[in-house]
Image (cartoon, rainbow, N blue to C red):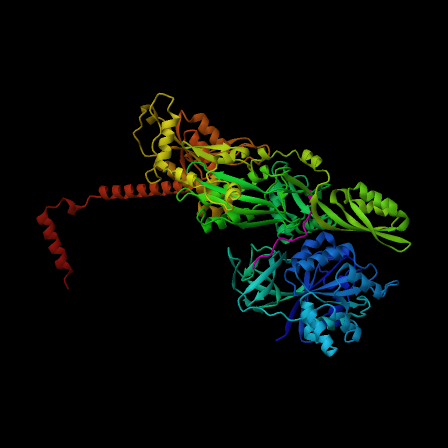
Amino acid sequence: MMKKLVVGILAHVDAGKTTLSESMLYLSGKIGRLGRVDNKDAYLDTYELERARGITIFSKQAMLEIGETQIILLDTPGHVDFSAEMERTLQVLDYAILVISGADGVQGHTKTLWRLLHMYRIPVFLFVNKMDQIGTDKDKLIKELKKQLDDGCIEFGQAEMDNFYDQLAMCEEMMMEAFLETGHIKRVQIQKAVRERKVFPCFFGSALKLEGVEQFMQGLVNYAMIPSYPPEFGAKIFKIARDEQGNRLTYLKITGGRLKVKDVLTNGIRKEKVNQIRIYSGQKFGTVNEIEAGSVCAVTGLSQTRPGEGLGIEAASAAPVLEPVLSYQIILPEGCDPRVMIPKLRQIEEEEPELQIVWDEQLQEIQAQIMGEVQIEILQSLIQSRFGIEVAFDAGRIVYKETIANVVEGVGHFEPLRHYAEVHLLLEPWEPGSGLQFGTQCSEDSLSKSWQRLILSHLEEKVHRGVLTGSAITDLKITLVSGRAHNKHTEGGDFREATYRAVRQGLKEAQSIMLEPYYTFQLELPEKMVGRGMTDIEKMHGTCAISETNGETAVLVGSAPVVTMRNYQKEVMAYTKGLGRLFCSLKGYEPCHNAEEVIENSGYDSERDLANPTGSVFCAHGTGFLVEWDAVKDYMHVESYLQQKGSSGEAVLNQATYSEERWISLEEIDQIINNTFYANQGKKSAWKRRKTARDSYYEQAAYADRQKESKEEYLLVDGYNIIHAWPELKELADENMDGARMKLLDTLSNYQGIRKCRVIVVFDAYRVQGHVEEVIDYHNIHMVFTREAQTADQYIEKFAHDNQKKYNITVATSDGLQQLIIRGAGSALLSARDLKIEIDGANERMKREYQEMKRIDRNYLVDVLSPAAKQQMKEIVNKDNEP
């Protein structure tokens, strides 16, 4: 069986990466003639956009054989704007080829690529290209590679020479011992050193002229080790794309076992079946029924996969290090509905996850995060070619982030009526560039393992917003340290609310720091203009130093904020008359140079951000109430982790608080409301004890107040809430929302015919610009579409508040906060589940009554006969049945 190697090819833009790929394909016999980037006929630049721009935009694969080794070559984008696409490919590589321009040496983005290869622990072969150009110096370049990248960079073009073994021996102890004993180092030892990233083989040549390429290819197969794979199935997804017919393709590397057509794949959450396995090489593909470990393929049939996911035994990858730092508004043409456009943009977001397409409700605009101006141009062209829509982009904004400077404990509590959850989180500043880290130090005596896992999943599922500008938080470690659940009233959604509030409450207490993205740059200038360059960098709030000078040109290296350096390339070209060059790559996030100005301009108020509340919900005397963030710790039920740790060295539950707290039943809650709500009104309570759905809210009850018996009954239904809560309607809504809406209306119409109450079904239309409140009669019920900027919740709450004295009102919803408000207004409640049970019960009762009526209405002769006559009839029947 042929040995397989998955090799990625990376480079700074214009280093000749695609040209080297073409040369390797040509020399291996894969293609009959050499394509050229400038001739727009390169084998791997398959997209029209790539051929027009002369750059690689999307990663692609090609297959070639070198001897008994099959190389699966993954070509990646070189331009910094598409570096996230390149980084996703790194997750599946066995080895990497780093192409460096001999004319330019180690450039800014080359160092970024080197850091990523180090982070992903990928062994590297280097090919120094364009050595045919005048002025290139091999010895000088080797010294630069050792200095700028790693001392293990060794020229392999003259392997097996004495000096070659001398250099290898300096890289690794075992090779040193072998060299001292025998004067020789075995190939397997060199392979091992390359695999362990202690040696980085370097080859020199010209890909365009096919110089040194064949030697490089032979060196690649000689000094690379073929990986071994486990027998259990595993796969890593690294790319989502669509073919010319619009079929969704999931690109993956098989990391264990085998994959067959019609196999069912799972990531531990969902399962989907593989319909087709494609092996791509350039633009063409072949299909196979089975594929083994070590191979890269594209499969159809998977509709919900994402880059970075693991299948089978393979774990999911961490989020990419390189991320967009600019946010742009996507401006749609006149008459183009954003609600129609967003699902289309989601398709592109699947293929480019870093875009992060979002609808900003407050600004009423579509936003996308983008790496740079070249990506904007490509996106515009992609949207035009795929959907026939011309979009524009605004000037863009910087994507800021936030972190904290001190350790705090955040507390979140969620306890509206019949719900309960409390969460304590330790928030600690972490290493720059580390993102968000999550963990748990919570005793299972406080929270069971299942609740702890749920809380960690809630921490990971959301982009948590800071309290300075609402920007995403980063460089934090968040640890679950304590919490509490109720054995009867706690539901999963309660911990979601408590977890989110705990993060925000902790951030409000902490000393927050504003972060902004920084570029690391390399600025090449005529030597006489160095002063101008250094002055500019200082004005940009950056730092720099002269790294080298040769009497004619000088090179400045340093870092500066992205916001100040964004358009500096054009300025450099202007004042150097085209002789200067600026290379930038993202360094990461650092404290913002003008934090106060950014915070003030954002106009963000953390305490008015309803989607990210900072306070908590507590319950007393049967009524839920909100507590502001700065008072939450005065009400919390579990003692502070930090206080306990400070006094005793470890966190324990406050036993006094635990023993004093007594959980109460639903009936007791209603009794408390009964006793307190009407205590000062000098009259007996009008509340009845809450019945179950089976008992029915609508059965006649003996109220103390006779006047209430004559009140008309109203059932208000939160339409979309019920649709998404009933599984059979939700499944229908995923395909056809109108169908789900009509099925709900028909169900309620039948129910009204049985119960004879007034039914109002309320649907949100608050996002429809200029929409006025619309009431439509549907058979025997009323259907309401809310006006612009009014949600169904708001309509129901207003109706309940305004009419509670005139009618007996029941509200059907599973929205926890809405239930709290409605119950406080004096109306009865049905959850989505209870409404379903009530309707099914009413239908069943109607059927029984109908059957009973049919049975009574029939006049059977036998029913009126005497016992003696019945016996005689029975004997006659039996006699007739005898043979």
Task: Please identify the quarter of the rendering in which residue 669 is found.
Answer: top left
Principal SS element in the magenta part?
A: loop
Residue 326 on the magenta span = yes
User: Which residue sits at x=78%, y=62%?
Assistant: 145
Q: Is residue 775 visible?
A: no
Extreme residue toward the top, this view? 682
Tell me the magenta residue range: 315-330
User: Which residue sits at x=84%, y=45%?
Assistant: 534
Q: Residue 448: x, y in percent?
A: 44, 49
Extreme residue toward the bottom, this view? 182
Task: Please identify the quarter of the rendering in which residue 772 is found.
Answer: top right
Frontmost residue, 5 versus 834? 5
Frontmost residue, 863 versus 642? 642
Q: Residue 456: x, y in percent?
A: 52, 49
**In the image, is residue 71 above or below residue 469?**
below
Q: Residue 318: x, y in percent?
A: 61, 54
In this rendering, would 349 be left or right of 635? right
Q: Residue 845: x, y in percent?
A: 31, 41
Task: Please identify the quarter of the rendering in which residue 183 is found.
Answer: bottom right
**In the image, is residue 472 above or below residue 249?**
above
In this rendering, would 353 be left or right of 644? right
Q: Is residue 686 visible?
A: yes
Extreme residue toward the left, this view? 868
**In the image, is residue 668 above or below residue 157?**
above
Instruction: For the N terminus, give its image quadrant.
Output: bottom right
User: Which residue sits at x=12%, y=55%?
Assistant: 876
Residue 26 on the magenta span = no
Frontmost residue, 842 versus 239? 239
